[in-house]
Image: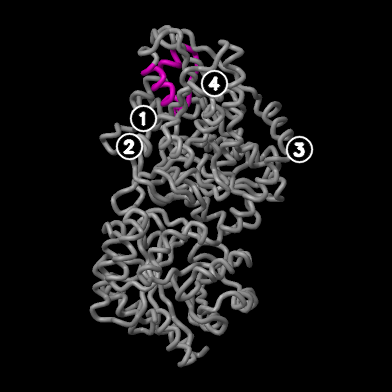
Amino acid sequence: MYNYPDSKGHFGPYGGIYMAETLMPAVEELRRQYEHFRGDPEFKSEFEYELKHYVGRPSPIYHAKRLSEHFGGAQIYLKREDLNHTGAHKINNAIGQALLAKRMGKKRVIAETGAGMHGVATATVAARFGMECVVYMGAEDVQRQAPNVFRMKLLGATVIPVESGSRTLKDACNEAIRDWVTNVETTFYIFGTAAGPHPYPMMVRDFQCVIGNEARVQMPELIGRQPDVVLACVGGGSNAIGMFHPYIDVPNVKLIGVEAGGHGIESGSHAAPLTGNAKVGVLHGNKVYLMQDENGQIIETHSISAGLDYPGVGPEHCLLKDIHRAEYVAINDDEAIAAFDALCRYEGIIPALESSHALAHAMKIAPTMGKDKVLLVNLSGRGDKDMNTVAKIKGITL
Amino acid sequence: MSRIQAAFEKLKVQQRKALIPFVTAGDPNPQVTVPLMHGLVEAGADVIELGVPFSDPMADGPTIQRASERALKHNVSLRDVLGMVAEFRKQNATTPVVLMGYGNPIEAMGWETFAKRCAEVGVDGVLTVDFPPEESHEAFAHLEAHGLDPIFLLAPTTSDERIAEVAKLARGYVYYVSLKGVTGAGHLDLGAIAEKLPHLRKYISLPIGVGFGIRDAQTALAVARLCDGVVVGSRIVQEVENSNEQDVVANVGKLVKELRVAIDQA
């Protein structure tokens, strides 16, 4: 029986609470409060109300028929998280944590963001619940995701560009943690992915499990059975764990997490700690597979998609890899772009570059499978935010 | 008796407070560090906290982040830092050296190898900022096996339960972080420290050092009156940053001497 994490937040050898003493009481308080409210029917019904009436859930599952026909193999179905309010799965978690923050009496929320989707989701819920909001974003990402920066500002958030280190998601995390240390009494840290110190990996997973729970009901309604393969992209891994977790105990459903292969695993310029066999290490409060040099310094990662450009991965994915319940593969930048183009042209859906990685792997394996096989891809977000990046790759100035 | 224990016992007899400066190893370059450590001792340091550079120093403010970045430009590794301590020990057999940093470089080396190497080169204590007691049991068993002192942080937010837990595991001294926030931030609240220290003493029999936010001789003296040792980090690292490379040892020495004179009035 799969039952993780343990009471100390360990997923087998992974996870845990690796934080400076200053934050330990805050993390402990968060764990206590979450343990209390996760079983509270009133909390649950408020969360469900918000998901239905504010986010627009359930998100549909769509049979991408033309795309499937084009590849001539397995049928590709899309879980349309891109249709959520704010355009990605991130809002599911942001709502959940904001409801918790409200109950804990916190008036200020902070967040880190890579592609900007979690930042937008946090700014959105902060506006919705009347909280002050500060979002930390790597200076590099502020440039490549300019439309999302503007969205956050419109929603009343303060966006702070982070100039240290590689100026991407990991550095935004560092800076958000520094803020939290300093303002721990007034501030709730709305962490965006299923990683970090316990209880975040569990809590973010729980909030995101709405994705997989819906899919488990929707697939039998659509095709009379569960899919053969479920695919999702993995940066920190929140959309993937939300999709995978409800399927862990469902037999004969293969789970595939798709990491960012960047310029290729062999090039070293990627963001795929699981596929690239990174060593296990400690960063941002948890023990996970972590891209680092031989001296334990975190190395700069590369991905075309800012949301996957992170050297670590959530602890539950590390465990699922080790116990072979999920398989992890990598998709390179150019393959992701090809999948992005294909979905635009064949289905009239512009996917996020992050989700395009999962889609690309589906397109790779679909032709090798029979037409009666079914692939379910978590389309975690929409691609509006990626216009600048894609235009630049195609040599177009907007 | 460990070097740290011996140093504090000697200070107790002399009725003096410990001065514990922090520098980042390899900042601004690897050649400066050993002479700088000797300079710190000459200027009156009782214990040296030697920072191991890390790419993602989450608990540090901009000053110490930049020190890490300068050291990492020279690829200063944990192995190099251990080499620096070995070099320092050739001329100094008594001043305790505490390595301070984040867990991942140690994880990469392996705790067993790390502890063995520390003992060989003459490291006395290890402070791993992001390894709280909950995650430290296995790692710190290796330190203990090699006679190294695990140094722990306590914060204004630390609960009594956690203070008691740290009291059980800690050796050498306990480092009380005097303010909420990262290193080098804000101003400390002397009143709050004065209130907190007697409370900590109910649990902790080891000497208590206080750090974070000590930026001048006057504050150092005021803090020294309340505890057993004064830790000064960002202010010293700032002096390293603002000095020409050839003046680092002299300038930092001058600053540390001022701090020494001040806290000896305590």
**What whole-number distance in Å separates the C-alpha atoms at marks 4 and 3?**
28 Å
Q: Secondary structure at mark 3?
A: helix
What amino acid is found at the position of numbered circle 4 in the picture? Lys
Instruction: Identify which residue, A11 or A293, lies in the foreground.
Output: A11
The image's colour scheme reads one colour
- Which is more foreground, mark 4 or mark 2? 2
Pointer 4 and pointer 3: residues touching (CB < 8 Å)?
A: no
Instruction: Identify which residue, B56 or B215, lies in the foreground.
Output: B56
Q: Do marks 4 and 3 share a chain?
A: yes
**What whole-number distance in Å separates the C-alpha atoms at marks 4 and 2?**
27 Å
Q: Which residue is mark 2?
A: A276
Q: Which residue is mark 3?
A: A42
Q: Is residue A356 visible?
A: yes
Q: Which residue is mark 1?
A: A330
Residue B97, horizontal then vertical, whole percent: 36, 74
Asked if the magenta segment contains residue A164, the reply would be no
**What whole-number distance in Å separates the C-alpha atoms at marks 3 and 2?**
43 Å
What amino acid is found at the position of numbered circle 1 in the picture? Ala
Q: Secondary structure at mark 4?
A: strand
Pointer 4 and pointer 2: residues touching (CB < 8 Å)?
A: no
Above-or-below relation of A145 to A295? above
Pointer 1 and pointer 2: residues touching (CB < 8 Å)?
A: yes
**Residue at figure coordinates x 43%, y 85% from the top left:** B260
Q: Which residue is mark 4?
A: A79
**Residue at figure coordinates x 60%, y 43% from the top left:** A157
